[in-house]
Image: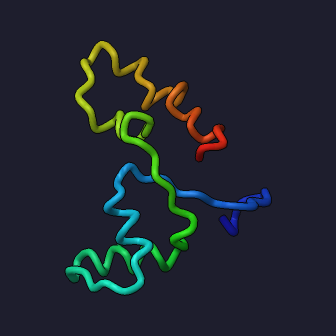
Amino acid sequence: MDNLDLHIDTVKFYTDSKVVLGYISNETRRFFIYVANRVEKIRKFSSPSQWNYVPTNRNPADSGTRSVPAHEIHSSEWLLGTKTTSFLRTEEF
């Protein structure tokens, strides 16, 4: 972000995994080493308060991992980013 020519007030991250949110916000519990390493990297570049939950059915990133028939790929919301990204514009998030 240091190389961008615009001012950014806040940065938010979204996940559809409540388990991941629990890992990121946990200050006391010890994790398996691979989880601890990943959480350490995440916390190095972000704070737990920046992380938010989005339901799976509203997560546009998930669309790319779901089975989509070949004839529908060109009009998928994952590529076009239309309706599903509207969750970012609501007060809820």
Q: How many marks?
A: 0
In the image shown, does 87 or 38 lie closer to the viewer? 87
Q: Quadrant of the N terminus?
A: bottom right
Q: Position of residue 23 (x, y in %)?
A: 35, 71
Way the structure is coloured? rainbow
In the image shown, does 69 or 18 lie closer to the viewer? 18
Q: Residue at x 58, y 32 (%)?
A: 86
Q: Is 8 drawn above or below residue 27 in the view shown?
A: above
Judged left or right of residue 50, residue 54 is left
Q: Position of residue 11 (x, y in %)?
A: 63, 60
Residue with the most extreme left position: 32
Judged left or right of residue 20, residue 13 is right
Q: Position of residue 19 (x, y in %)?
A: 31, 61
Q: Is 35 drawn above or below residue 70 in the view shown?
A: below
Residue 92 placement: quadrant: top right
Q: Position of residue 33 (x, y in %)?
A: 22, 83
Q: Residue at x 46, y 46 (%)?
A: 54
Q: Residue at x 34, y 36 (%)?
A: 64
Q: Residue at x 31, y 84 (%)?
A: 29
In the image shown, does 63 or 6 lie closer to the viewer? 63
